[in-house]
Amino acid sequence: MSASLLLQAVILGVLLGGLYALLAAGLTLYFGIMRVVMIAHAAFLVLAAYLAWWINREMGIDPLLSLVVTVPLFFVIGVLIQRLLVSRLKPLTLTMMSVLLTFAVALVIEGGLGFLFTGTQRRIPLSYASDSLNLFGAQVPVVKLIAFGLAALSLALLFLLLKYTRFGQALRATIQHPEAARLVGINTDRVAGYGFGLGLATAAIGGTALSLDATIYPSLHWHWIGPLMAIIVVGGLGSIPGAAIAALVLGVAQSLLQLPMGPTWAQTVFYIALFLTLMFRPQGFFGGRLAKRF
Amino acid sequence: MPAPQYGSRIVGAIAMASIAAITISGCSGGGGGQGGGGSDDPIVIGISLPLTGDFSEPGKGVERGYEAWRDIVNENGGLLGRQVELKILDDQSNSDRVVSDYESLIAQDGVDLVFGPFSTRLVVPSARVAQEYGMLFVEPAGAAAEVFEQGFDNLFYAAPAVANDHYNNLADYLLALPAEDRPETAAVASMDDPFAQGTAYGLRDKLEAGGVEVLVNEVYPPNTTDFSTIAAKIAQADADIVIGGTQYQDAVNLIIALQQLDYQPELAAFSTAPTNPEFAAAIGDATEGILAPTGYSPQSEFESNVEFVEKYTEMHGNPPSEDEANAYTTGQVVAAAVEAVGCAEQGECQQELIDWLRDNTVDTVVGPLSWDETGKPTGAHLIQQWIGGEILIVLPEDVKEADFLFPKPAW
């Protein structure tokens, strides 16, 4: 195995890991805020990718511009889902029942996409789809670089928002201790709704980033939800930095392991990491205790 | 008095069950004897197709082909003077579902005939069900070697050649080149799927036997969406030719990943995807020189094909592709047997249909078809190449629409 192939695999792995980080960020946020396991997150990613494709087909504009529509739209949908559906679940069985509820939402999205756009596999035709930059002899595909940039930017913004704004403080307080948060005057219901909307807004960005370099079809989300779930468990449920680190590590590991082991065995890295985490460090490798996040 | 009540309930339940059993066997077995046909009832054909899930793209193509066949047959007066009706179930690309679908179609709905589903992974389990019920099983898409190694005596593949023989014309051409022009190295990537591997390994093994060195030999699971590392391996090896055992999205993603890494092979052969109407748009028209084997071309001059292409284009606004054509061929093969034998129902009739197909050649939209004793067709595929934004037949020489470009231009 040559050094240049190794460098190429590391670069591709980092780019892939960055995308994983963005796609997993919303998932860990929902769990952190409300102990909700959001199976439909990947379905929303695919929905956003479809919207980007559809807007591109109808108006011929770059898929990145569709973010202007999809990010606010997904935020509103997220708030509505939290207020109208998730908040109706009994607190005692919330986590378990949220799996069923969001599973149903995922099926509705998949069915709706199949109904509207058929099962035909789609891809956004981009003039720069196969362009790449040369870096020390390795090729860096432009579309993957854009997706990585989007991921880095959104995660940085999300981090700043949670760390330094009043809303972020309220959200973190809600995550850490809902009762105490209510005592100091935080409207935790509203904050949880906005938090859910925020998670879904990341799905809008993630789905658009995905659509730049993927062939999409309605059932694609089932291929994504497993690895994403593994990432947020390894990273520590509820921790966005944890999810980001786990995503990068697992992305690079998957990319590198493909060299000696081939793609079939390399994708088991997610599940092996999941098993090891559950066995030796159930609270996750990169987060602290659930209540002390960010 | 609970006891008598329970007793009468049990008796009642047994009575219901036996009535149900009689009704079911009546449905499926009724008209099993000679002369059971001839009524004005429509001939019902049971089919299970992957209309959702991984194979939904080709599955829908097969559905369109079956429906076009039904419409054209009914327009021409039906089969044996009876109208044809299709009963199509969705198996969600799931091999458990496909088994229960065919069981319920045959046993409960009592369909008169069955047609096969799409893809080897679904054809094998469903053919086994059809075999248990003694049904003729003509299928449009189970081309891998393992289909013909199961000992089925009811199965016929309605296409010109099995997967391993798809590239025979290309392999013969390359190996006949003078030594200095012949490719020396090859990279192979294939989906972990019997059909996709069959096509790629058929070509790989023939070239390897002819002295070509295989530098990369990758297998990826069907759910793979990221092809960047596989592409990196192939690009680094810089093999003369690249062979992809692909379906659709994997080919598109792999080709773009190879282009992103600036890999320029002398020859790029991918199964299935390049003949898909979405293909050129999906990879941004960077298709130049890509090869694919095909069992079907809308331009071919076979008698029934002219009518098929004309009517299909009228119905859908675009000419049929290979999936539609193979489905249509399935209909033609079964129809030929039904018309020749003069029956279409469950029971002895099915064995007569099977026996007739063993000994006869059927003219179809993909040319005349005949089969060996395992149901394997005895032809070879055309090789098509993307040239100037069109996909044209380049091999074999006697039916070519354009000259084969080798080495291929940059993509």
Image (cartoon, rainbow, N blue to C red):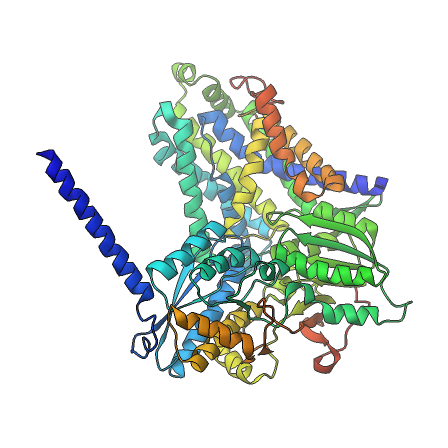
Residue B116 spot, x, y in % from top left: 49, 64
Quadrant holding the C terminus of chain A: top right
Of residues B103 and B404, the one nearer the viewer is B103
- Give how far across and how far down residue B411 sits, in percent: 75, 62
State the image quarter where residue A96 is shown.
top left
Q: Is residue B56 above or below residue A91?
A: below
Vertical placement of B347 versus B201: above or below? below
Percent x, y for residue A62? Answer: 60, 54
On the question of residue B316 being in view, the answer is: no
Give x and y (percent) for residue B37. Answer: 33, 76
Q: Residue at left 40%, top 56%?
A: B103
Residue extending furthest left? B1
Say left or right for B263 vs A27: right
x 49%, y 44%: residue = A43
* Residue at 47% across, 40% down: A40
Q: Quick check: B315 above or below A113?
A: below
Q: Quadrant of residue B21?
A: bottom left
Is A227 or A60 nearer to us in this picture?
A227
Question: Is A138 in front, or is B93?
Answer: B93
| Residue under the image location 37 percent in, 33 percent down | A83
Between B240 and A174, the one nearer to me in the picture: B240
In the displayed structure, does residue A242 sit left or right of residue B33?
right
